[in-house]
């Protein structure tokens, strides 16, 4: 097993373990809406769940949920195929492989929630959920909710009156509640955007060396 494969494997497995451990811990120790203050007034563990996409965005309707979960499953397999393809190419930049591995692990982490959590846990409304309860889970296969818990309300205030539409309304940054999987996906995507010159220049330089 070469160095790039080890890096991809360690990154993927590490993110997946941390993501699922944090979600199971929250699900089995907190009720929905409960929160713990971690650092000052800007970092909380706040338990929430969502039916949709990253950072609490929604994809409405019962069939919408099924479509989204099915799409995620297909997407995860597509990302895994692409990652394997990159690992087989000797000239792929290690940093790019790491980014794709993070995106894959994050997508897989949220897929596990969406596919299995509905049958693994009962609901968390006004109670702490149990793993594999005798009465069954809160939903069916493919209809699980994604567990979110990382909340960073870094700054709050009121929009000035001259701001169109939102003038005088309160605002908060950063409002969305997310999880480790979302963080891995965002880190991978942003890193590719920021370092794409480095990632793909390396490939061009290698190709130039081969043709010389």
Image (cartoon, helix red, strand yellow):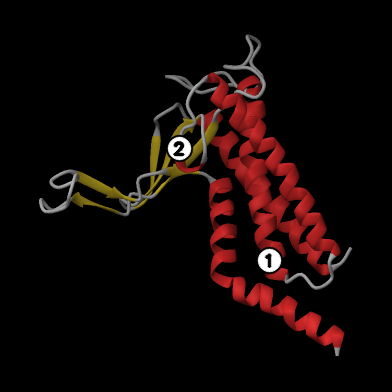
- Badge 2 marks a residue whose secondary structure is loop
- Badge 1 marks a residue whose secondary structure is helix
- Image quarter for residue 199? bottom right
| Residue 24, position as x, y percentages in the image | 60, 34
Q: Is residue 48 above or below residue 200?
A: above
Task: Pick the residue in front: 9 or 67.
Answer: 67
- Image quarter for residue 137? top right
Position of 195 with respect to 5 (left or right) is left
So how many labels did they put on this image?
Answer: 2
Task: Pick the residue in front: 211 or 141.
Answer: 211
Quadrant of the snapshot with the N terminus: bottom right
Q: Who's the residue at 73% across and 79% down the image?
A: 204
For mark 2, what is the residue?
57
Q: Residue furthest right?
A: 1
Position of 98 with respect to 36 (left or right) is right
For mark 1, what is the residue?
96
Q: How dense is the environment of label 2, judged by Cα within 10 Å: few (below 14), some, or many (20 and up)?
A: few
**For the residues marked 1 and 2, what is the alpha-carbon distance in whole angstroms?**
27 Å
Q: Earlier in the sequence, mark 1 or mark 2?
A: 2
Q: Who's the residue at 65% across and 61% down the image?
A: 99
The label number, if any, that marks residue 208 in the structure image? none
Position of 153 with respect to 108 (left or right) is left
Q: Who's the residue at 67% across and 46% down the image?
A: 16
Q: Who's the residue at 79% across and 81% down the image?
A: 206
CB under 8 Å between callouts 1 and 2?
no
- Image quarter for residue 22? top right
Q: Residue furthest front?
A: 211
Quadrant of the snapshot with the C terminus: bottom right
């Amino acid at each position: 097993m070469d160095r790039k494969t080890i890096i991809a494997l360690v990154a993927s497995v590490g993110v997946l373990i941390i993501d699922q451990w944090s979600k199971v811990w929250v699900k089995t120790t907190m009720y929905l809406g409960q929160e713990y203050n971690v650092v000052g007034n800007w970092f909380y563990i706040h338990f929430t769940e969502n039916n949709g996409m990253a950072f609490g965005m929604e994809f409405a309707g019962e069939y919408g949920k099924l479509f989204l979960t099915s799409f995620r499953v297909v997407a995860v397999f597509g990302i895994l195929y692409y990652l394997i393809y990159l690992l087989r190419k000797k000239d792929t930049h290690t940093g790019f492989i790491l980014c794709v591995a993070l995106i894959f692990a994050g997508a897989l982490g949220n897929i596990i929630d969406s596919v299995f959590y509905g049958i693994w846990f009962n609901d968390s409304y006004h109670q702490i959920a149990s793993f594999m309860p005798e009465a069954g889970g809160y939903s069916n296969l493919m209809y699980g909710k994604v567990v979110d818990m990382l909340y960073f309300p870094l700054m709050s205030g009121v929009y000035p009156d001259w701001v169109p539409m939102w003038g005088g309304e309160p605002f908060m940054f950063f409002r969305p509640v997310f999880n480790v999987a979302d963080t891995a996906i965002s880190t991978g995507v942003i890193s590719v955007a920021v370092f794409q010159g480095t990632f793909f220049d390396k490939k061009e330089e290698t190709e130039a060396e081969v043709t010389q």
